[in-house]
Amino acid sequence: MPAVSENTVRASLERLAGDCLQCYQCGQCTAACPSGWDFDEGPRRVVRLVLAGDAAELMDNEDVWRCNECGNCTAACPMEVDTRAVMTTVRELQREHGGASCPERRAVDVAHRQLGRRARIDNIAFGAAMVSRGAVPRDLVGSAVQGATSARSLLARVRAQVVEMTGADRRWPQLTQEDGRPAGVAGPAGLTTDEQTEAQPFFAGCALPQDLEAYRLTHKVAADLGLALAEQASAGCCGHPARGTRPATYKADGAALTVCPACDAGLREVGQQTRPLWDALTEKARRDGASLAAAAPALVPYVGCLGERGAALTALADAAELAGVEVRRSYPSLHASCCGALGGMFRGQTTGTRRLLDFAAAAQAPIVTTCLLCRDNLRSGARLSRLPVSVYYWPEFFSAAKPAAPSPSPDPRKARPAGAASVAAGPVTAVATSAPVSKDDTHE
């Protein structure tokens, strides 16, 4: 490192150390970190290096690039050290003055460049750029599936543009669907304009529009529950993949509904209020006296590392209650550990995902997650572990229940036998279970 840069880094670290003087290295920050099991030098180690003024060691630290900025470390600190800000500051010093070279840093650099040229991250271009920089996917099958999914979405969008520009839908009506959208293009299927439909601003992010089926199901379950999702064509990215170097430009009146915890974090950084779509759908169903249908009689919840753990797990349990299915849970942090997407790319199984998949296999229940990226990474983990565990994205598992058909009027000519009891069949409400926590597990 040049002498000028070294002096600048040391001066920055001295200022940063002043904000960390009260740290007594209790380790609560690392214990609270969703990636704490897998960090080589977690947040406690980074703070200790800051206090020691070890610029050389800090500039080579790779864990600051694996930090997803969830803020759990700061919330857990009994001495009120803003550990999240410490990790961010060290990362910015590395960006300006050299520093470590790791796949997670390359992922941030690729995202930064992409968002300088286009509004959203393109999964195909992102993957190709990462491979060209030596980051070979850990799950080749999963990467191929995701690439094919993104390609289908791209082709559908191109086709929609061609249909719109050429007016081909007027000459060949079969190119459009019943609701007038170009065939094959996902959209707000089933939306109505009656007084029962509520329209709310919706931020789809980067990943969801590149999965046509997940996008369609998201709009469909919202429409079936009477909620119209109002998207902005120029919404762009939340900026989280670029770690804030390309901040979001999205603005909406009131809280925007989101389907990604990373989008929540990115939008809140620029002052935009957000609310998870799944919470809004569950609340509306309960308010309207509606119920949900589920793809299986039980589920293992997973809310990812960036979601607000307690609130997110409660929201999934509320949806399960509306669907009449059982929630099978272990200790809370297991359901909110890192899925393996450190730096926005699947780097392989984490300790948390291995334990979660083992728990789901033993519980004989699928995993349901509120994040599309988490779904794909958990599926990769299940594939690499060869475990028979299904992983669902929220709208793949939950849907609006169809209203029961009215029962036929009883035939008065058929008399009830004397003494016959009247039996009403009703739904069975399952009780959530909790697995015991191992005494040697210190992460909780």
Image (cartoon, helix red, strand yellow):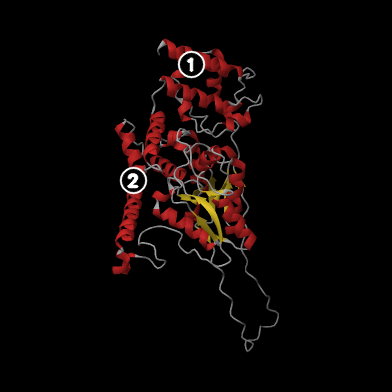
Q: Is residue 319 visible?
A: no
Q: Secondary structure at mark 2?
A: helix
Q: Amino acid at mark 2?
A: Gly
- Residue at x 39% of width, y 26% of height: 102
Q: Secondary structure at mark 1?
A: helix
- Residue at x 62% of width, y 87% of height: 414
Q: Estimate the x, y position of residue 203 in percent, counting from the top left.
A: 49, 49
Q: Number of marks in the image? A: 2
Work out whether 440 lies above or below 206.
above
Q: Is residue 311 visible?
A: yes
Answer with mark 2 or mark 1, whichever residue precedes in sequence. Answer: 1
Single out the residue that lies furthest toward the right. Answer: 419
Q: Estimate the x, y position of residue 232 in percent, counting from the top left.
A: 47, 51
Badge 1 density bin: few <14, some 14–19, many ≥20, Cα 10 Å: many
Viewer-nearest residue: 328 or 24:
24
Work out whether 153 lies above or below 267.
below
Work out whether 32 lies above or below 183.
above
Name the image quarter holding the N terminus.
top left
Image depth: mark 2 or mark 1 in front? 1
- Residue at x 61% of width, y 50% of height: 432
Query: Which residue is under mark 2?
Result: 147
Query: Which residue is under mark 1?
Result: 9
Viewer-nearest residue: 326 or 139:
139
On the picture, is 378 further left or further right than 279?
Answer: left
